[in-house]
C-alpha cells in the first residue's frame, strides 16, 4: 500500500468518525474535488451534509458550533465557535491535493 493510499485512508477515517458520531452514513471514498477551490475541496464535499460551510488549509467552518465542537473533540483539535482546526493529516492532504498529488480525486482532469 502506498504512502498516499495510507494518507487518504487516514483522512477518510477522520471524516467518517465525525459522520458516524452525528448519525450520518460513512463514506467509502472521499468525493472528487476541484483543485485549489476551497468551496469544492475533498473535505468540504465529504462534510457538507453535516453543515460544512468552507475549508481552508488551517480551518473548517461549520454552520453549527455544536458540530464544530463534536469534530474538534473527536479529532483532538480545537474549535473556536463554528470553526475547527483540522488534524495535521487533513491539513497535509489539502496541501498535497492542491499541489497535484491526488489527481485521481481532481474532477477537472
Image (spheres, helix red, strand yellow):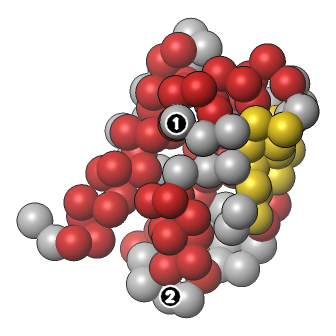
Q: In the rendered image, which quarter is residue 36 located in?
A: bottom right
Q: Residue furthest bottom?
A: 99
Q: Residue furthest top?
A: 23
Q: Is residue 52 visible?
A: no
Q: Is residue 10 visible?
A: yes
Q: Secondary structure at mark 1?
A: helix
Count of marks, rendered view: 2
Q: In the rendered image, which quarter is residue 1 located in?
A: bottom left
Whether the residues at callouts 2 and 1 have beta carbons within 8 Å, the answer is: no
Q: Of residues 65 and 41, which is closer to you in this image?
A: 65
Q: Secondary structure at mark 2?
A: loop
Residue 2 is left or right of residue 99, and the answer is left
Q: Of residues 107 and 30, which is closer to you in this image?
A: 30
Front label number (2 vs 1): 1
Label located before the other in sequence (2 or 1): 1
Residue 20 - label: none
Q: Count neighbours of disc 2 (C-alpha within 10 A) and say few if under 14, some if 14 to 19, many if 20 or more.
A: few
Q: Residue 68 location, x and y as percent?
A: 75, 30
Residue 9's place in the image compared with 35, above or below, is: above
Residue displayed at 36% across by 58% down: 8
Tag 2 residue:
100
What whole-number distance in Å separates the C-alpha atoms at marks 2 and 1? 26 Å
Q: Of residues 98 and 91, which is closer to you in this image?
A: 91
Q: Residue 59 location, x and y as percent?
A: 75, 55
Residue displayed at 34% across by 50% down: 10
Residue displayed at 89% across by 33% down: 81
Tag 1 residue:
75
Q: Residue 104 location, x and y as percent?
A: 41, 74
Q: Residue 78 location, x and y as percent?
A: 69, 39
Residue 2's place in the image compared with 27, above or below, is: below
Residue displayed at 52% across by 36% down: 75
Residue 42's place in the image compared with 26, above or below, is: below
Amino acid at each position: 500500500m502506498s504512502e498516499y493510499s495510507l494518507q487518504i485512508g487516514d483522512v477518510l477515517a477522520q471524516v467518517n468518525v465525525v459522520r458516524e458520531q452525528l448519525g450520518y452514513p460513512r463514506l467509502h471514498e472521499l468525493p472528487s474535488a476541484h483543485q485549489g477551490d476551497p468551496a469544492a475541496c475533498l473535505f468540504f464535499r465529504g462534510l457538507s451534509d453535516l453543515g460544512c460551510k468552507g475549508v481552508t488549509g488551517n480551518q473548517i467552518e461549520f454552520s453549527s458550533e455544536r458540530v464544530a465542537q463534536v469534530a474538534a473533540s473527536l479529532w483532538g483539535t480545537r474549535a473556536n465557535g463554528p470553526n475547527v482546526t483540522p488534524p495535521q493529516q487533513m491539513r497535509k492532504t489539502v496541501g498535497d491535493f492542491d499541489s497535484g498529488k491526488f489527481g485521481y480525486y481532481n474532477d477537472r482532469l
